[in-house]
Image: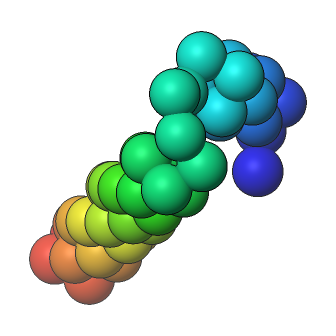
């Protein structure tokens, strides 16, 4: 986890009107971050295998 990501999540929690929406936002953010990093890793692996 990088520091900027944690700070952004903290900001989302603080500005959120309800706990439920804060949790939903965190889950969504985390899921998209994980998906992005997984895709990047897969693409890097595929490129390494091809060359």
| Left or right relative to 51: residue 29 | right
Residue 40 or residue 51, whichever sits in front: 40
Q: Residue furthest bottom?
A: 49
Q: Residue furthest left?
A: 50
Q: Out of 46 and 51, give the one closest to the viewer.
A: 46
**Quadrant assignment, res 7:** top right
Q: Taking 24 as reference, is 41 above or below it?
A: below
Please report the residue visible at 65 percent of the width from the left and 33 percent of the height from the top. 13
- In which quadrant is the C terminus drawn? bottom left
Reply above or below: 33 against 44: above
Residue 27: x, y in percent?
Answer: 46, 62
Left or right of 21 in this view: 26: right
Q: Position of residue 2 (x, y in %)?
A: 77, 38
Let me know if residue 19 appears in the view: yes
The figure's colour scheme reads: rainbow
Q: Nearer the viewer, residue 43 or 49?
A: 43
Number of numbered labels in the structure image: 0
> Is residue 26 at all visible to an observer of this figure?
no
Residue at position x 76%, y 51% in the image:
1
Q: Residue at x 49, y 56 (%)?
A: 20
* Residue 23: x %, y % from top left: 54, 57
In this rendering, is residue 20 above or below 11? below
The residue sitting at 39% across, 65% down in the picture is 31
- Of residues 46 and 9, the one nearer the viewer is 9
Furthest-front residue in view?
A: 18
Judged left or right of residue 11, residue 22 is left
Where residue 41 appears, as percent x and y from the top left, is: 40, 68
């Amino acid at each position: 986890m990088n520091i900027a990501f944690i700070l952004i999540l903290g900001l989302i929690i603080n500005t959120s009107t309800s706990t439920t929406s804060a949790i939903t936002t965190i889950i969504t953010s985390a899921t998209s971050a994980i998906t992005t990093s997984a895709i990047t890793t897969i693409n890097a692996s595929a490129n390494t295998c091809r060359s």
